[in-house]
Image (tube, rainbow, N blue to C red):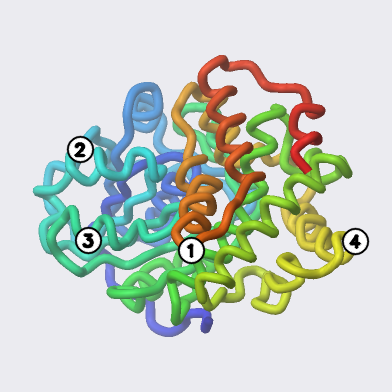
Protein backbone atom coordinates (compact mmCIF):
# COMPACT_ATOMS: atom_id res chain seq x y z
CA UNK A 1 0.00 0.00 0.00
CA UNK A 2 1.18 3.47 -0.78
CA UNK A 3 -0.13 6.54 0.98
CA UNK A 4 -1.57 9.11 -1.35
CA UNK A 5 -0.05 12.52 -1.86
CA UNK A 6 0.06 15.27 -4.41
CA UNK A 7 -2.29 17.98 -5.63
CA UNK A 8 -5.63 18.24 -3.85
CA UNK A 9 -8.69 17.56 -6.03
CA UNK A 10 -10.98 20.49 -6.86
CA UNK A 11 -14.07 21.16 -4.78
CA UNK A 12 -16.63 18.44 -5.45
CA UNK A 13 -20.21 17.64 -4.52
CA UNK A 14 -19.91 14.56 -2.32
CA UNK A 15 -22.78 12.50 -0.92
CA UNK A 16 -22.18 10.39 2.19
CA UNK A 17 -24.95 7.85 2.63
CA UNK A 18 -25.15 7.06 6.32
CA UNK A 19 -23.88 9.68 8.80
CA UNK A 20 -23.07 7.35 11.68
CA UNK A 21 -19.70 6.98 13.39
CA UNK A 22 -17.58 6.31 10.29
CA UNK A 23 -19.74 8.07 7.71
CA UNK A 24 -20.11 11.09 9.98
CA UNK A 25 -16.36 11.37 10.43
CA UNK A 26 -15.69 11.08 6.70
CA UNK A 27 -18.38 13.64 5.88
CA UNK A 28 -17.17 16.14 8.46
CA UNK A 29 -13.56 15.85 7.34
CA UNK A 30 -14.51 16.29 3.68
CA UNK A 31 -16.47 19.39 4.67
CA UNK A 32 -13.47 20.67 6.64
CA UNK A 33 -11.24 20.60 3.55
CA UNK A 34 -13.77 22.47 1.43
CA UNK A 35 -16.01 19.99 -0.37
CA UNK A 36 -19.76 20.47 -0.71
CA UNK A 37 -21.13 17.59 1.35
CA UNK A 38 -24.61 16.12 1.60
CA UNK A 39 -25.37 13.34 4.09
CA UNK A 40 -28.29 11.00 4.50
CA UNK A 41 -29.56 10.23 7.98
CA UNK A 42 -32.75 9.36 9.81
CA UNK A 43 -34.73 10.20 12.92
CA UNK A 44 -32.98 11.95 15.77
CA UNK A 45 -29.66 11.88 13.98
CA UNK A 46 -31.12 13.72 10.98
CA UNK A 47 -32.86 16.26 13.21
CA UNK A 48 -29.67 16.92 15.20
CA UNK A 49 -27.57 17.44 12.07
CA UNK A 50 -30.18 19.79 10.60
CA UNK A 51 -30.36 21.81 13.83
CA UNK A 52 -26.74 21.89 14.98
CA UNK A 53 -24.58 20.54 12.17
CA UNK A 54 -22.57 17.32 12.13
CA UNK A 55 -20.08 17.55 14.99
CA UNK A 56 -16.92 15.48 15.36
CA UNK A 57 -14.33 15.58 18.11
CA UNK A 58 -11.42 13.50 19.29
CA UNK A 59 -8.61 12.06 17.20
CA UNK A 60 -9.00 14.23 14.10
CA UNK A 61 -9.78 17.40 16.05
CA UNK A 62 -13.05 19.24 16.57
CA UNK A 63 -15.17 20.42 13.65
CA UNK A 64 -18.81 21.27 13.10
CA UNK A 65 -19.86 20.56 9.51
CA UNK A 66 -22.93 22.46 8.37
CA UNK A 67 -23.79 19.96 5.67
CA UNK A 68 -27.04 19.36 3.82
CA UNK A 69 -28.89 16.50 5.54
CA UNK A 70 -31.65 14.48 3.90
CA UNK A 71 -33.37 11.11 4.26
CA UNK A 72 -32.58 10.33 0.62
CA UNK A 73 -30.51 12.14 -1.99
CA UNK A 74 -32.34 14.72 -4.06
CA UNK A 75 -29.77 15.13 -6.85
CA UNK A 76 -26.81 13.43 -8.48
CA UNK A 77 -23.46 14.12 -6.75
CA UNK A 78 -20.00 14.05 -8.32
CA UNK A 79 -19.10 11.07 -6.14
CA UNK A 80 -20.71 9.16 -3.30
CA UNK A 81 -19.64 7.17 -0.25
CA UNK A 82 -21.81 4.43 1.23
CA UNK A 83 -21.08 4.15 4.95
CA UNK A 84 -24.13 2.36 6.32
CA UNK A 85 -23.77 -0.99 8.06
CA UNK A 86 -23.92 -4.10 5.92
CA UNK A 87 -27.42 -4.85 7.21
CA UNK A 88 -28.75 -1.61 5.70
CA UNK A 89 -26.78 -1.47 2.47
CA UNK A 90 -29.43 -2.84 0.10
CA UNK A 91 -32.14 -0.57 1.49
CA UNK A 92 -29.89 2.52 1.36
CA UNK A 93 -28.72 1.85 -2.18
CA UNK A 94 -32.24 1.09 -3.40
CA UNK A 95 -33.58 4.31 -1.87
CA UNK A 96 -30.88 6.39 -3.57
CA UNK A 97 -30.51 4.39 -6.78
CA UNK A 98 -31.75 7.12 -9.12
CA UNK A 99 -29.23 9.66 -7.77
CA UNK A 100 -26.38 7.14 -7.95
CA UNK A 101 -26.82 6.13 -11.59
CA UNK A 102 -23.31 6.10 -13.08
CA UNK A 103 -21.86 7.94 -10.06
CA UNK A 104 -18.47 6.76 -8.71
CA UNK A 105 -19.23 5.08 -5.38
CA UNK A 106 -17.01 4.03 -2.49
CA UNK A 107 -18.45 1.32 -0.22
CA UNK A 108 -16.90 1.63 3.26
CA UNK A 109 -18.20 -1.39 5.07
CA UNK A 110 -17.33 -4.31 7.29
CA UNK A 111 -17.52 -7.81 5.88
CA UNK A 112 -16.62 -9.18 2.48
CA UNK A 113 -17.55 -8.10 -1.04
CA UNK A 114 -19.81 -5.13 -0.29
CA UNK A 115 -18.54 -3.27 -3.35
CA UNK A 116 -19.39 -6.20 -5.64
CA UNK A 117 -22.92 -6.41 -4.25
CA UNK A 118 -23.37 -2.64 -4.72
CA UNK A 119 -22.19 -2.80 -8.32
CA UNK A 120 -24.70 -5.55 -9.07
CA UNK A 121 -27.56 -3.62 -7.48
CA UNK A 122 -26.71 -0.31 -9.18
CA UNK A 123 -25.96 -1.89 -12.55
CA UNK A 124 -22.60 -0.19 -13.08
CA UNK A 125 -18.97 -0.98 -12.25
CA UNK A 126 -17.79 2.42 -10.97
CA UNK A 127 -17.66 1.07 -7.42
CA UNK A 128 -14.62 0.93 -5.13
CA UNK A 129 -14.22 -0.93 -1.86
CA UNK A 130 -13.16 0.84 1.32
CA UNK A 131 -12.09 -0.12 4.84
CA UNK A 132 -11.94 2.23 7.80
CA UNK A 133 -9.35 1.54 10.50
CA UNK A 134 -10.33 4.45 12.74
CA UNK A 135 -12.28 3.81 15.94
CA UNK A 136 -15.25 6.11 16.54
CA UNK A 137 -18.33 6.20 18.75
CA UNK A 138 -21.66 7.78 17.82
CA UNK A 139 -24.04 7.34 20.75
CA UNK A 140 -25.48 10.88 20.75
CA UNK A 141 -27.39 12.16 17.69
CA UNK A 142 -25.27 14.35 15.41
CA UNK A 143 -22.06 13.87 17.41
CA UNK A 144 -19.14 11.54 16.64
CA UNK A 145 -16.15 10.98 18.92
CA UNK A 146 -13.05 9.57 17.19
CA UNK A 147 -11.32 7.48 19.87
CA UNK A 148 -8.44 6.26 17.68
CA UNK A 149 -7.24 7.53 14.32
CA UNK A 150 -6.38 5.14 11.52
CA UNK A 151 -6.11 4.81 7.77
CA UNK A 152 -8.95 4.53 5.33
CA UNK A 153 -7.99 1.84 2.81
CA UNK A 154 -9.43 1.91 -0.71
CA UNK A 155 -9.05 -0.35 -3.70
CA UNK A 156 -10.59 -1.86 -6.78
CA UNK A 157 -12.37 0.03 -9.54
CA UNK A 158 -12.28 3.80 -8.89
CA UNK A 159 -9.82 3.18 -6.05
CA UNK A 160 -7.38 5.82 -7.28
CA UNK A 161 -10.16 8.42 -7.52
CA UNK A 162 -11.22 7.92 -3.91
CA UNK A 163 -7.64 7.69 -2.65
CA UNK A 164 -7.08 11.18 -4.06
CA UNK A 165 -10.40 12.51 -2.73
CA UNK A 166 -10.07 11.19 0.80
CA UNK A 167 -6.32 11.66 0.99
CA UNK A 168 -6.67 15.40 1.61
CA UNK A 169 -9.14 14.85 4.47
CA UNK A 170 -8.00 11.66 6.20
CA UNK A 171 -4.99 9.31 6.29
CA UNK A 172 -5.68 7.21 3.17
CA UNK A 173 -3.92 4.35 1.41
CA UNK A 174 -4.66 2.38 -1.74
CA UNK A 175 -4.36 -1.41 -1.62
CA UNK A 176 -3.61 -3.70 -4.57
CA UNK A 177 -6.13 -6.25 -3.24
CA UNK A 178 -9.29 -4.99 -1.62
CA UNK A 179 -10.36 -8.61 -0.98
CA UNK A 180 -7.15 -9.34 0.92
CA UNK A 181 -7.54 -6.11 2.89
CA UNK A 182 -11.15 -6.99 3.72
CA UNK A 183 -10.03 -10.32 5.12
CA UNK A 184 -7.41 -8.65 7.31
CA UNK A 185 -10.04 -6.19 8.57
CA UNK A 186 -12.38 -9.13 9.17
CA UNK A 187 -9.74 -10.59 11.46
CA UNK A 188 -9.37 -7.26 13.27
CA UNK A 189 -13.16 -7.06 13.59
CA UNK A 190 -13.15 -10.17 15.76
CA UNK A 191 -12.78 -7.64 18.60
CA UNK A 192 -16.44 -6.61 18.17
CA UNK A 193 -18.66 -9.54 19.11
CA UNK A 194 -17.56 -10.26 22.68
CA UNK A 195 -17.84 -6.64 23.92
CA UNK A 196 -21.37 -6.60 22.45
CA UNK A 197 -22.27 -9.78 24.32
CA UNK A 198 -20.95 -8.77 27.76
CA UNK A 199 -21.41 -4.98 27.54
CA UNK A 200 -17.77 -4.11 28.24
CA UNK A 201 -15.30 -2.03 26.24
CA UNK A 202 -13.00 -3.68 23.72
CA UNK A 203 -10.02 -2.83 25.92
CA UNK A 204 -11.56 -4.44 29.02
CA UNK A 205 -12.44 -7.58 27.09
CA UNK A 206 -8.87 -7.96 25.84
CA UNK A 207 -7.52 -7.40 29.38
CA UNK A 208 -9.59 -10.37 30.63
CA UNK A 209 -7.52 -13.55 30.00
CA UNK A 210 -10.57 -15.79 29.55
CA UNK A 211 -12.36 -13.46 27.17
CA UNK A 212 -9.11 -12.78 25.28
CA UNK A 213 -8.71 -16.54 24.80
CA UNK A 214 -12.12 -16.74 23.09
CA UNK A 215 -11.40 -13.65 20.99
CA UNK A 216 -8.13 -15.22 19.85
CA UNK A 217 -9.98 -18.45 19.00
CA UNK A 218 -12.34 -16.48 16.72
CA UNK A 219 -9.31 -14.81 15.13
CA UNK A 220 -7.65 -18.19 14.58
CA UNK A 221 -10.73 -19.46 12.76
CA UNK A 222 -10.74 -16.35 10.58
CA UNK A 223 -7.05 -16.58 9.70
CA UNK A 224 -7.15 -20.33 9.03
CA UNK A 225 -10.27 -20.06 6.87
CA UNK A 226 -8.86 -17.23 4.76
CA UNK A 227 -5.50 -18.95 4.31
CA UNK A 228 -7.17 -22.23 3.37
CA UNK A 229 -9.27 -20.35 0.80
CA UNK A 230 -6.13 -18.90 -0.80
CA UNK A 231 -6.69 -15.30 0.33
CA UNK A 232 -3.67 -12.98 0.02
CA UNK A 233 -4.07 -11.11 3.31
CA UNK A 234 -2.94 -7.49 3.00
CA UNK A 235 -1.07 -5.54 5.70
CA UNK A 236 -3.30 -3.23 7.72
CA UNK A 237 -2.08 -1.08 10.63
CA UNK A 238 0.74 -3.35 11.62
CA UNK A 239 -1.13 -6.62 11.05
CA UNK A 240 1.08 -8.18 8.39
CA UNK A 241 0.58 -11.43 6.46
CA UNK A 242 3.25 -12.96 8.73
CA UNK A 243 1.27 -11.99 11.84
CA UNK A 244 -1.85 -13.47 10.28
CA UNK A 245 0.03 -16.79 10.15
CA UNK A 246 1.11 -16.28 13.76
CA UNK A 247 -2.54 -15.88 14.73
CA UNK A 248 -3.46 -18.98 12.75
CA UNK A 249 -0.80 -21.41 13.88
CA UNK A 250 1.52 -20.09 16.63
CA UNK A 251 1.18 -21.15 20.28
CA UNK A 252 -1.45 -19.15 22.14
CA UNK A 253 1.11 -17.27 24.27
CA UNK A 254 2.58 -15.81 21.07
CA UNK A 255 -0.62 -15.42 19.07
CA UNK A 256 -2.33 -13.45 21.86
CA UNK A 257 0.10 -10.61 21.24
CA UNK A 258 -2.06 -9.62 18.25
CA UNK A 259 -5.21 -8.73 20.27
CA UNK A 260 -2.97 -7.15 22.91
CA UNK A 261 -1.43 -4.93 20.22
CA UNK A 262 -4.92 -3.97 19.04
CA UNK A 263 -5.77 -2.93 22.62
CA UNK A 264 -2.68 -0.70 22.75
CA UNK A 265 -3.60 0.90 19.44
CA UNK A 266 -7.07 1.74 20.74
CA UNK A 267 -5.58 3.79 23.58
CA UNK A 268 -7.19 4.59 26.92
CA UNK A 269 -10.56 5.97 25.80
CA UNK A 270 -13.06 3.08 26.15
CA UNK A 271 -14.10 1.81 22.73
CA UNK A 272 -17.37 -0.08 22.58
CA UNK A 273 -16.92 -1.56 19.13
CA UNK A 274 -19.44 -1.07 16.33
CA UNK A 275 -21.52 -4.12 17.25
CA UNK A 276 -22.14 -2.98 20.81
CA UNK A 277 -22.90 0.54 19.61
CA UNK A 278 -25.66 -0.88 17.41
CA UNK A 279 -27.13 -2.80 20.35
CA UNK A 280 -27.08 0.26 22.60
CA UNK A 281 -28.91 2.20 19.86
CA UNK A 282 -31.50 -0.57 19.49
CA UNK A 283 -30.36 -1.39 15.94
CA UNK A 284 -29.56 -4.67 14.24
CA UNK A 285 -25.86 -5.51 14.29
CA UNK A 286 -23.47 -6.58 11.55
CA UNK A 287 -22.55 -9.82 13.30
CA UNK A 288 -23.77 -11.93 10.37
CA UNK A 289 -21.49 -9.97 8.02
CA UNK A 290 -18.49 -10.28 10.37
CA UNK A 291 -18.41 -13.46 12.47
CA UNK A 292 -21.09 -14.99 10.26
CA UNK A 293 -18.97 -14.32 7.17
CA UNK A 294 -16.22 -16.51 8.65
CA UNK A 295 -18.71 -19.31 9.30
CA UNK A 296 -20.06 -19.10 5.75
CA UNK A 297 -16.60 -18.97 4.16
CA UNK A 298 -15.48 -21.97 6.22
CA UNK A 299 -18.48 -24.04 5.15
CA UNK A 300 -17.78 -23.26 1.47
CA UNK A 301 -14.36 -24.90 1.69
CA UNK A 302 -15.34 -27.80 3.94
CA UNK A 303 -14.17 -26.36 7.28
CA UNK A 304 -15.96 -25.32 10.46
CA UNK A 305 -15.80 -22.19 12.62
CA UNK A 306 -17.61 -23.19 15.83
CA UNK A 307 -16.43 -20.30 18.01
CA UNK A 308 -17.63 -17.72 15.50
CA UNK A 309 -20.92 -19.59 15.07
CA UNK A 310 -21.47 -19.49 18.85
CA UNK A 311 -20.63 -15.78 19.02
CA UNK A 312 -23.17 -15.06 16.27
CA UNK A 313 -25.88 -16.79 18.29
CA UNK A 314 -24.97 -14.97 21.51
CA UNK A 315 -24.98 -11.56 19.81
CA UNK A 316 -28.41 -12.32 18.38
CA UNK A 317 -29.59 -13.30 21.87
CA UNK A 318 -28.48 -9.92 23.23
CA UNK A 319 -30.19 -8.23 20.26
CA UNK A 320 -33.46 -10.02 21.07
CA UNK A 321 -33.44 -9.48 24.84
CA UNK A 322 -31.55 -6.21 25.19
CA UNK A 323 -29.68 -7.71 28.15
CA UNK A 324 -25.93 -8.27 28.22
CA UNK A 325 -24.72 -11.70 29.31
CA UNK A 326 -22.26 -12.67 32.06
CA UNK A 327 -18.65 -13.01 30.86
CA UNK A 328 -18.68 -16.62 32.10
CA UNK A 329 -21.02 -17.54 29.24
CA UNK A 330 -18.37 -16.45 26.73
CA UNK A 331 -15.35 -17.80 28.61
CA UNK A 332 -16.75 -21.31 28.25
CA UNK A 333 -16.48 -21.21 24.44
CA UNK A 334 -12.73 -21.87 24.29
Front: mark 4 or 1: 1
**What distance separates the C-alpha of mark 4 from that of mark 2?**
50 Å
The residue that disc 3 covers is 119
User: Where on the picture, by quarter, is residue 114?
Assistant: bottom left
User: Where on the picture, by quarter, is residue 160?
Assistant: bottom left
Label 4 Cα crowd, 10 Å radius (few <14 / some 14-19 / many 20+): few
- First reached walking from the N terminus: tag 4 or tag 3: 3
Front: mark 3 or 2: 3
The residue that disc 4 covers is 253
- Judging from the image, what secondary structure is the residue with disc 1 in? loop
The residue that disc 2 covers is 72
Determine which of the numbered discs, if any, sits on residue 269 in the image: none
Given residues 83 and 233, the one toward you in this image is: 233
The residue that disc 1 covers is 301
- Judging from the image, what secondary structure is the residue with disc 4 in? helix
- Marks 4/1 in contact by CB < 8 Å: the verdict is no
- First reached walking from the N terminus: tag 4 or tag 2: 2
Q: Residue at x 22, y 61 (%)?
A: 119
User: Where on the picture, by quarter, is residue 42?
Assistant: top left
* Image coordinates for residue 255, horizontal then vertical, percent: 81, 64
* Image coordinates for residue 297, horizontal then vertical, percent: 48, 58
Given residues 40 and 295, the one toward you in this image is: 295
- First reached walking from the N terminus: tag 4 or tag 1: 4
Q: Residue at x 77, y 62 (%)?
A: 258
- First reached walking from the N terminus: tag 2 or tag 1: 2
- First reached walking from the N terminus: tag 3 or tag 2: 2
Amino acid sequence: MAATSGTSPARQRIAVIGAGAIGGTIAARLDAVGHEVTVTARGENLAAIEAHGLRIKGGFGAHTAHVAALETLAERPDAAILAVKATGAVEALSANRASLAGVPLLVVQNGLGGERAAARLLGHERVAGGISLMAANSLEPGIVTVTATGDTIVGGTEGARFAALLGEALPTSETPSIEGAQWTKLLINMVNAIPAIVGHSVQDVIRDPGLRRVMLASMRETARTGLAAGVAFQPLQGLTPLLVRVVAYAPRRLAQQVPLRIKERLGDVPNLGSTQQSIRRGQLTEVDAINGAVVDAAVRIGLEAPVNAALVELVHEVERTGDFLPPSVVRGLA
